[in-house]
Image (cartoon, helix red, strand yellow):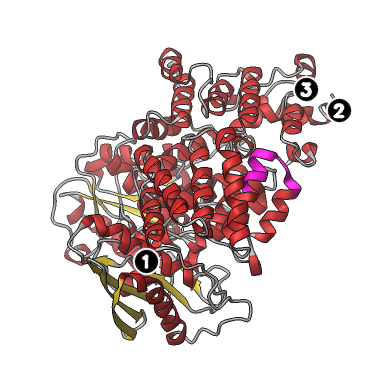
């Protein structure tokens, strides 16, 4: 097979088989995750004596990540912590021997000063230990202190105000949620300087407590005025009217984002603060913006009252505020007036390209139906997605000239296909018709071009058309976060343009920094390009944003498996499966890792839920399981079925580490040809 011999060396290194044997086997490639794939060994030093023997740190020598401080009577607990950190891939400096002497030796003090995180185990004994208190004091001064209580005790008074985790009930189970939360805190200290994109959460388990998101949001934004529009409060006294207040917020965001001279935080991140009484300055710091718009909506019959205030985050002052008492039919004018007031208050100069009023003014019932559709769409449950579909259809039926309704319905159907709610072959013709109709009604509606780009990449495998539509979806080199997400994942990553995929997903995260879908997908792209540490940091941030976001756990399982750390991967796969037992990807990942963990019967019992891959979306999931089990030909067959089904996920999944054995096999050229991949040989080599 042309080019295969030239790749034998790579396959040999990857599988651990001799080059001669690979040549004879003709495709009998080792499964993804086999032990011979291990390419590196982490050397950890677990006792002070080991480092002391080598003397002070030489230039280029890497000290451990964590300095573990504890009282010698807590040695058994300290050992559990050290082993837990090391299983998670972190190196630890700790001392299993008695402390002696009245001062630190040179090597010990150097390790303490240069550790990225100093873990202090507070107990009744350690709080009175002058050694532990001194180490904690130095770590606090160096901003590396990550304390934890291992039993109920009165901490030294100077540390009472330091946020301290409570693991007094922890028995050593590394899958325990309390341990995972604390481990995420420690990782942020260890890796806080290694990632150019990301937020540093302070150990919270909700979006409101995620801090320093501005490091993401400000990347590449220069000095543009910036704003976050918080969800308008529903004061109508009727929870059923919440769709209206949410919809008004989203409409204002959509209006503001059209102006290149203004940086606007996207919906998901802004809505992370819904229902929370969070200080405005804290919101602005988290989202990396200088201004915040908040307001309320009260609806009574055919009357509405909208209040809005624009607040400067630097000092909390009101730059502008207004109250609108109008008829319901005036809601579109209210939206325009609020947008115009914001532009004036922030001194935003509208560019010549900015349309003065590009929107079609829809019929009011159609507008309300679309708001209800979007409200249901964002809940992302099978029931809500079905409701969203009905409301989208209703909006178009009520106003066939409503371009935005056509474009958003096309986007909704694309999402259904990606989540396996609807077969792609069934909805693709409808998606194409809707997107083209939207452009006929409004040629400037960029979202429709984003949909057509994704359709060209995942259904037509027409990469030239995908490139053309992508350019049209990015007027002025600016696109919506959803366009960056869809095109980055399905077009760029799917076609093997991996670095460009990373760039597009970064743009999505910058615009919507608290969106776990965008952040976890960026992590997926980073895994593909081999930047595992950065990917892990992003996924740990996703756990801070939403500890029950299934894809985060799934991608952490894939990441650890790609690193050959199957023991660490299995708990994450199990959690993903528990959160979404009907999701094919969670089923196959958990089943495959059970097989790797020595439980083949249990793994095969779980994977039976996928059958033979007949159900839409099951084939590409089944391919993962087959690849892990070493049945590369069966995996290739499953990927081929997924391609024939036009599963939109298959092209980018084939770029991932789980598909490496298939890409390294003689079956790959045919699969690449079925997807019309440009320069298939080059894709294999990257």
Read off the residue under disc 3: 19
Residue in front for this viewpoint, 177 or 276: 276
Could you tell me how far apart the alpha carbons at marks 3 and 2 are, in whole angstroms? 16 Å
Question: Considering the image in quadrants, where does the C terminus appear?
Answer: top right
Report the predominant secondary structure element of the magenta stretch: helix
Could you tell me how far apart the alpha carbons at marks 3 and 1 are, in whole angstroms? 61 Å
Residue in front for this viewpoint, 301 or 554: 301
Q: Which of marks 3 and 2 is in front?
A: 2
Crowding around mark 2 (Cα neighbors within 10 Å: few <14, some 14 to 19, many 20+) is few
Read off the residue under disc 1: 249
Q: Which of marks 3 and 1 is in front?
A: 1
Q: What stretch is highlighted in magenta?
A: 454-464
Secondary structure of the residue carrying tag 2 is loop
Secondary structure of the residue carrying tag 1 is helix
Read off the residue under disc 2: 2
Is residue 98 in view?
Answer: yes
């Amino acid at each position: 097979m042309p080019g295969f011999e030239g790749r034998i060396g790579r396959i040999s290194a990857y599988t651990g088989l001799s080059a001669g044997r690979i040549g004879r086997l003709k495709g009998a490639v080792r499964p993804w995750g086999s032990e011979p794939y291990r390419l590196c060994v982490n050397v950890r030093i677990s006792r002070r004596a080991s480092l002391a023997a080598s003397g002070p740190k030489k230039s280029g020598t890497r000290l451990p990540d964590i300095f573990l401080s504890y009282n010698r009577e807590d040695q058994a607990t300290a050992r559990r912590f050290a082993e837990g950190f090391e299983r998670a891939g972190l190196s630890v400096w700790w001392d299993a021997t008695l402390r002696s002497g009245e001062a630190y030796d040179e090597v010990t003090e150097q390790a303490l000063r240069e550790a990225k995180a100093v873990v202090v185990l507070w107990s009744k004994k350690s709080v009175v230990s002058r050694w532990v208190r001194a180490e904690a004091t130095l770590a606090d001064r160096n901003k590396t202190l990550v304390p934890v209580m291992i039993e109920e005790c009165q901490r030294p008074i100077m540390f009472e105000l330091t946020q301290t985790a409570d693991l007094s009930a922890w028995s050593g189970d590394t899958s325990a949620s309390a341990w995972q939360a604390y481990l995420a805190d420690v990782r942020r200290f260890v890796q806080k300087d290694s990632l150019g994109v990301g937020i540093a959460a302070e150990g919270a388990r909700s979006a409101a407590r995620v801090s320093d998101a501005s490091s993401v949001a400000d990347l590449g934004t220069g000095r543009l005025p910036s704003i976050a529009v918080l969800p308008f409060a529903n004061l109508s006294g009727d929870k059923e009217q919440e769709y209206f207040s949410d919809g008004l917020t989203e409409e204002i965001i959509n209006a503001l984002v059209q102006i290149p001279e203004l940086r606007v935080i996207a919906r998901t991140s802004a809505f992370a603060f819904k229902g929370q009484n969070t200080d405005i300055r804290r919101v602005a710091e988290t989202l990396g913006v200088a201004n915040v718009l908040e307001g309320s909506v009260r609806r009574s019959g055919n009357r509405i009252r909208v209040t809005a205030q624009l607040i400067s985050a630097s000092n909390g002052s009101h730059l502008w505020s207004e109250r609108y008492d109008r008829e319901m039919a005036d809601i579109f004018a209210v939206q325009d007036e609020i947008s115009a007031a914001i532009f004036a208050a922030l001194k935003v100069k509208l560019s010549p390209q900015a349309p003065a009023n590009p929107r079609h003014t829809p019929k009011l019932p159609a507008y309300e139906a679309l708001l209800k559709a979007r409200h249901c769409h964002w809940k992302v449950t099978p029931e809500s997605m079905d409701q969203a579909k009905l409301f989208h259809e209703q909006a178009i039926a009520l106003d066939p000239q409503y371009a935005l309704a056509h474009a958003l319905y096309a986007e909704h159907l694309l999402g259904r296909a990606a989540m396996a709610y609807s077969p792609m072959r069934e909805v693709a013709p409808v998606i194409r018709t809707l997107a083209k109709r939207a452009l006929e009604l409004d040629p400037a509606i960029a979202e429709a071009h984003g949909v057509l780009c994704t359709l060209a990449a995942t259904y037509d495998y027409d990469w030239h058309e995908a490139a053309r539509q992508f350019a049209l979806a990015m007027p002025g080199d600016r696109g919506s976060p959803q366009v960056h997400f869809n095109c980055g994942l399905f077009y760029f990553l799917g076609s093997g343009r991996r670095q460009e995929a990373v760039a597009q997903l970064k743009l999505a995260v910058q615009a919507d920094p608290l969106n776990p879908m965008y952040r976890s997908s960026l992590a997926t792209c980073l895994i593909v390009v081999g930047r595992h540490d950065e990917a892990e940091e992003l996924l740990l941030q996703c756990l801070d944003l939403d500890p029950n976001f299934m894809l985060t756990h799934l991608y952490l399982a894939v990441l650890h498996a790609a690193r050959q750390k199957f023991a660490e991967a299995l708990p994450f796969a199990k959690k993903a499966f528990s959160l979404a037992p009907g999701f094919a990807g969670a089923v196959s990942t958990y089943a495959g890792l059970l097989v790797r963990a020595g439980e083949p019967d249990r793994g095969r019992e779980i994977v039976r839920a996928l059958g033979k891959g007949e159900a839409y979306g099951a084939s590409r999931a089944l391919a993962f399981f087959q690849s892990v089990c070493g049945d590369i030909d069966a995996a290739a067959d499953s990927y081929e079925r997924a391609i024939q089904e036009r599963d939109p996920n298959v092209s980018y999944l084939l770029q991932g580490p789980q598909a490496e054995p298939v890409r390294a096999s003689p079956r790959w050229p045919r699969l690449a040809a079925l997807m019309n991949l440009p320069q298939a040989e080059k894709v294999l080599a990257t």
